[in-house]
Image: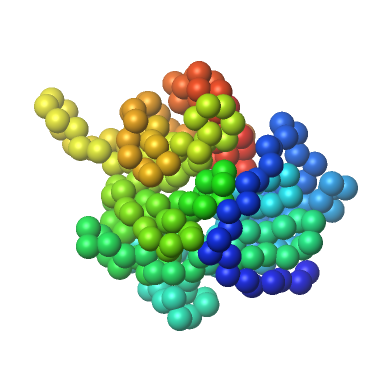
Amino acid sequence: MSRNWVHLPLLLASFSALPEMRAQRVYERSPDLIFEDAQGRPSSLGPGFNAVPISDHKFLLIRGARMGYGEESSCERPAAKNPVVVYDTQTNKEFLIFDKPLSDRMMEHEAACVYEHADLSPTGATLYIVSPCYATAGCLAVIDLPSGAARYVPGVMDVFVVRGGPKAGDLIYSRRLERTGTGAGHSYPYIHARPDGSQIAIISNEDLVLVGGNAPAPILRNYLRRIHGRIFVQGEWVP
């Protein structure tokens, strides 16, 4: 498979609508990503994770190994960073869209180039990356690709871009929030947010972990149905 490592700071082309049923897919078989074509033939794409379909033949991927909070990272050493790329199944090429350090004065730990989750806006102009900047939570970086400017939302654990419906391009993320009053502590509810990361509404304090393709989260699923949108989570569309 050939790879074309090209920076695309102006990746602004709109992606086509996603079909309900996909004839091809990219999935994880640790430590590699596997591409399965329309005939069911698998081929390795090399180390990576976070495969998110962004059109009928393009996937957003995070390259490299999964690295957590406190692990040594370096944007100068390929083995210790997580570039974000778009892989095109039609051409078997991938394009580098981001591999810069993420840092903000609110972070407890220099996240450098370690990323945990990523998604892309429907226009391709905004990249969303969650990095492990705290021992108990992450940080969401909202990156404007044309300018390279980034704003941060602290405490975010994962991020999903809403596809379809009138709220397409909005975000769903889980965020660490402090409880007040009786039973004070913290929780990690799912939140509906604007494309810039600002909160619209707290949806539910549910667990969205897919086990065998089953993630109940009924409140979150019903919320997505009401806004006629869906999100791509761990290889599955929800709802």
Q: How is the image coloured?
A: rainbow
Left or right side of 200 for 43? right
**Quadrant in the picture for residue 234:** top right
Q: Which residue is drawn at 52% across and 52% down?
A: 125
Q: Looking at the picture, how far across and down is residue 105, in whole percent?
A: 22, 62
Q: Quadrant of the N terminus?
A: bottom right
Q: Which residue lies furthest to the left in this view?
A: 181
The number of discs equals 0
Q: Looking at the picture, how far across and down is residue 158, in whole percent?
A: 43, 46
Q: Which residue is drawn at 57% across and 35% down?
A: 163
Q: Looking at the picture, how far across and down is residue 72, in whole percent?
A: 38, 73
**Quadrant in the picture for residue 179:** top left
Q: Is residue 17 above or below residue 239?
A: below
Q: In which quarter of the image is the C terminus?
A: top right
Q: Which residue lies furthest to the right in this view?
A: 39
Q: Looking at the picture, how far across and down is residue 168, in whole percent?
A: 53, 34
Left or right side of 147 for 52? right
- Residue situated in front as seen by the camera: 68 or 45: 45
Q: Residue at x 63, y 59 (%)?
A: 86
- Residue situated in front as seen by the camera: 57 or 15: 15
Q: Residue at x 77, y 63 (%)?
A: 92
Left or right side of 51 for 181? left
Left or right side of 19 for 61? left
For the question of whether residue 213 can be seen, the reply is yes
For the question of whether residue 61 can be seen, the reply is no
